[in-house]
Structure formats: C-alpha cells, structure tokens
Image (cartoon, grey):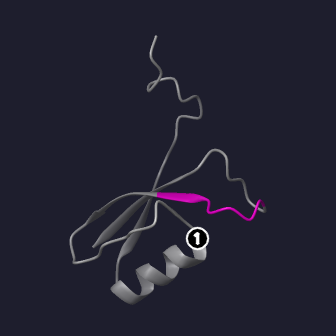
Amino acid sequence: MKIFVRERMRAEEGTKKPRFRVVGVQGGDLKIYAKRIRKVELKELAEHTGAEIVYLTRDGEGAEGKKG
C-alpha cells in the first residue's frame, strides 16, 4: 500500500499547522478523512498499516493550475 502526499505551501516547519496534504492512497483498505495531516500522524498511519509514504514534488511556481 502507498500513501501519496505533498507538502503544503502555506504551512512551513514550525508554524504548528499540518504540513502535508493527502493526495491519494493505493491498495489496502484505508480511508483518510482529514484533508491535511501532520508528519507524525502520517508516519504512525504508515507504521500501523504497513504502507509506504510517497512524497510528491512541487514545481514551486504553481503556474500550471492558473487560469490565463
């Protein structure tokens, strides 16, 4: 099983906000109801389910989703 996440732009380290957004889950029988999740919570989920965490990269610009 794999859990795909990406780091949020507005939540830097030390801001006391969840830093990651769950994008999708492959395989297994896991339902995640939270939109945003902390790294500690993510690691604990992966540990208990035997899942691998896949960190998706960002381009840093955010230009692809903008309407022009």
The reply, left or right, for residue 67 in relation to residue 7 is left
Q: Does 1 appear in magenta?
A: no
Position of 47 relative to 6 (above/below): below
Q: Badge 1 local density, few (<14 within 10 Å), some, or many (20+)?
A: few
Identify the main secondary structure in magenta. Answer: loop
Name the element at disc 1: helix
Q: Does 20 appear in magenta?
A: yes
* Region in magenta: 15-21
The quadrant of the rendering that contains the N terminus is: bottom left
Q: Which residue is at a point 44% across and 27% down the rendered structure image?
A: 65
Position of 49 relative to 6 (above/below): below
In the displayed image of the protein, which residue is found farthest to the bottom? 48
Residue 19 falls in image quadrant: bottom right
Q: Amino acid at mark 1?
A: Lys
Rendering coords of residue 31 (x, y %): 30, 72
Q: Which residue is at a point 68% across and 53% down the rendered structure image?
A: 11
In the displayed image of the protein, which residue is found farthest to the top? 68
Q: Which residue is at a point 72% across and 53% down the rendered structure image?
A: 12
Residue 4 falls in image quadrant: bottom left
The reply, left or right, for residue 40 in relation to residue 45 is right
Q: Which residue is at a point 22% across and 76% down the rendered structure image?
A: 28
Rendering coords of residue 6 (x, y %): 49, 53
The residue where tag 1 is placed is: 39
Nearest the camera: 17 or 2?
A: 17
Position of 15 relative to 39 (above/below): above
Rendering coords of residue 45 (x, y %): 44, 81
Position of 39 relative to 19 (above/below): below
Residue 30 falls in image quadrant: bottom left
